Image: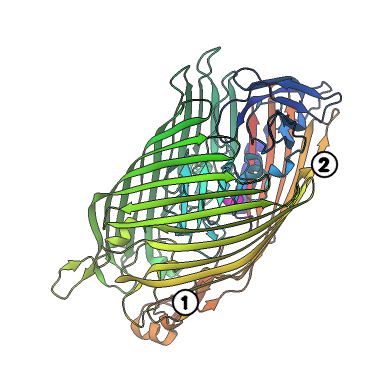
Amino acid sequence: MKINTLSALATMLLLLLFSVPLTVLGQQLTQTIRGKIIDKESQEPLIGATVAILTIDPPMGVTTDATGDFRLDKVPVGRHTLRISYLGYEEQVLPELLLGSGKELVLNIGLSESFKKLQEVVISAEQQSKGNPLNEMAMISSRSISVEETKRYAASVNDPARAAQNYAGVGISQDMSNEIVVRGNSPRGVLWRVEGIEVPNPSHFAEEGAAGGAVSILSVNMLDNSDFNTGAFPAEYGNALSGIFDIRLRNGNNEKREYALQAGILGIDFAAEGPFKAGSKASYLANYRYSTLAMLNKIGVKISGEAVPVFQDFSFKLYLPTAKAGYFSFWGLGGLSEQNVKAERDSEKWEGYLDRFDDRFQARMASTGISHILFLGKDDYIESTLSFSTSGNKVWVDSLQTDYTAVPFYRHDFAQQATRFSSLYNRKFNNRHTLRTGIILSQLGYDSYAGGRNIEYEEGEFVNQRGSTQLAQAFAQWKYRFTEQLTLNTGLHSLYFGLNGNTVVEPRMGMKYQLDAARSFSAAVGLHSRHDALTSYFAQQRHPDGNYTQPNRKLGLTRAAHYVLGYDQMLREDLRLKVETYYQHLFNVPVGIAENSTYSALNYERGISRETLVNEGTGRNYGVEMTLEKFFTNNYYFLLTTSLYDSKYSTRDGSLRDTRFNGNHIVNLLAGKEFKVGSNKQNLIGLNGKVMWAGGNRYTPIDLERSKEMKYEVLDVTNRFGVQTPDYFRSDIRVSYRKNRPNASYILSLDIQNFTNRQNVFGVQYDRIKEEVVTRHMVGMLPILNYRVEF
């Protein structure tokens, strides 16, 4: 997306700023905090648990009822710390929760049963649970991403993927993408899950085979706290090599109708939630968003010229509990995006070869499902989901002739569909033993075409295939607490890919040893695998007789062995130090069949390959990561993450080379401070900043003389990804103001990505008109203004 940022900022200021209420009220504003307390492993409600607010004098408290629910009314708005305790369970402290006047704060909190006898009262608080994964089976390389962090971090713009770019071991591929690079792996190794089941990449402007795009389809209005995994996954996760986003959608408020309206540079969206009827436990939640720039373009305000990025998305969740048949939820999300770039119809304005092309791009994604949780007793439950997904994109590229006639140059139309069913059985035998086992069945459909001319002007069909196949997975994992200090998680995951009959069995194991209340060691090992984008298997090779073959149809799954060691220490109750070191051995990697080929699937993040491939490549990633995190207490926080790593690959000749993603180092420093303002200190001004320093992108150098001779770009493939751009440096800031009024909150925020306007280098390309190598830069400064009302 190309945006004239200064014009966009001025326009949005005129459209939005006038509506911010600035009057100050003297009255004390209050709101409700309520929710449910459950056993973290069995999901059973805990009756009689105590919930206390520690930031009020005198403290407020309440106990949960027969369904595990609690309610605290007339709580002053602002930041509050909650303590949750229950006999025989580990106490938990939730610090600095934000309570606004526009929305109730509804919490779903899981407590872990103590290893000690149930008769004993456990008094050690677990504030260190901040950031710990929601999935209790994850021992290492996993953390939760809170909704508030997604909103708070500078330039995250309410996108969980952009928030994850701040964590240790995670890099980015470019400024305008939310795609992530985990521990030097290709972004194609990332798995997205929503409500416990795999979904297509939930991003606008997503390309074939990519794991990200320009704008997330997931609205922050819909999200609950979710998990992000970077390696050595528990056995329930499959079809992933490098990372997993395990996204959860929250339930709507089942007691009160609430709304949120947000307008900003990226889009205008509206959310609504509430009960289906008074007294019902059932609820609805829905959100719709439409591109702001597209709306302005329709009324004649063309901020980004003719190349307007157009997108819209819709998501929903209906929560339907029953008395005896369990809990049902019906959910969905989907988005459409497109951008048309037309060449100037004046050849004198063409500066480079690519200026003579018309380029039209469309992308789509949708996923919907029905989920069900049935409690068989107080210690076990079955969770099942049936879903249907569809995704795809279309590209039209035309070349202008001297008379400006558009001649078709390239076309592709990729479409995929998937019907999936997953079911898991979870049983907690006691405070030592938990068993979880399940299946995931997928019917995958595809309809793919790509043809025309490539950059070397070779013509033909690159892909032309339709049909369906199956993916079947099964898993079992067991969590056992040997002692109060030592916990072990073991399991197996199996995967069958029906397209070519590939089958793998993957053992997994993780452990955690708690030295004392503040320090712990963790370790995990496991095998993991993933199939490639379906179009990769159908790449066609044209023979002299005009016939085509599909040499990659039998390609096996790419596989990886993960080894991780970790150390975690609470330096004080709100300051955490975490260190992890890892080694990953990748094998069965698709590489070029020629002995001197340097092509490897580990280097590519999107698109299809026309190479003839064999599963004879390898790779290895290793590194050390450090996280120093000061949780949000006393109105400020900071997060420092450092990653030192090395990422290499080898082809059939066995030589080790740098991968495309081998930046070698990543350093992130985030910090923020909140100021209470107003007569009753009920309003908030937030200042947040971020600095990122990382190794630059690697690229394959261009053979200039050969390119001049051939009249198109010729790469020096003997030195594939052998050149690195200068180090990547970016500074982001975020300023926000929250105004609480009776029954409504108003939030104005401004994120400025790359506020120093540094021109980071993306790579190089050959311009056949100028006959020279041209450096390509990433996006400069990008301000994003948002105005939000919660009521």
User: Label 1, label 2: how many angstroms apart (C-alpha)?
Assistant: 49 Å
Q: Is residue 673 left or right of residue 657?
A: right
Q: Is residue 231 visible?
A: yes
- Check the image and name the residue furthest to the top: 278
Residue 196 image point, x, y percent: 47, 40
Residue 634, label in figure: 2
Q: Which of the 4 image quarters holds residue 384?
A: top left
* Residue 659 vs residue 78, the one in the foreground: 659
Please report the residue visible at 44 percent of the width from the left and 45 percent of the height from the top.
Answer: 476
Q: In the rendered view, does 574 fall on the left or right side of 254?
A: right
Q: Which residues are magenta?
A: 161-173
Q: Is residue 373 above or below residue 207?
A: above
Q: Which label is found at residue 212?
A: none
Image coordinates of residue 116 in percent, x first then y, are 69, 37
Residue depicted at 43% across the width and 69% down the height: 348
> Is residue 521 on the magenta stretch?
no
Q: Report helix, strand or loop for mark 1.
A: loop
Q: Name which quarter of the figure residue 507 lies in.
A: bottom left
Residue 714 screen position, x and y as percent: 39, 80
Whether the residues at callouts 1 and 2 have beta carbons within 8 Å, the answer is no
Q: Secondary structure at mark 2?
A: loop
Residue furthest toward the left?
545
| Mark with earlier residue (1, 2) | 2
200 to 32, vertically: above or below: below
Residue type, mark 1 in image? Thr
Asked if residue 166 is among those painted magenta in the image, a careful observer would answer yes
Q: Which mark is residue 700?
A: 1
Q: Label 1: how many residues lie within 10 Å, few (<14), some (14-19) or many (20+)?
A: some
**Rendering coords of residue 17 (x, y %):** 68, 37
Foreground tag (1 vs 2): 2
Q: Identity of the amino acid at label 2?
A: Asn
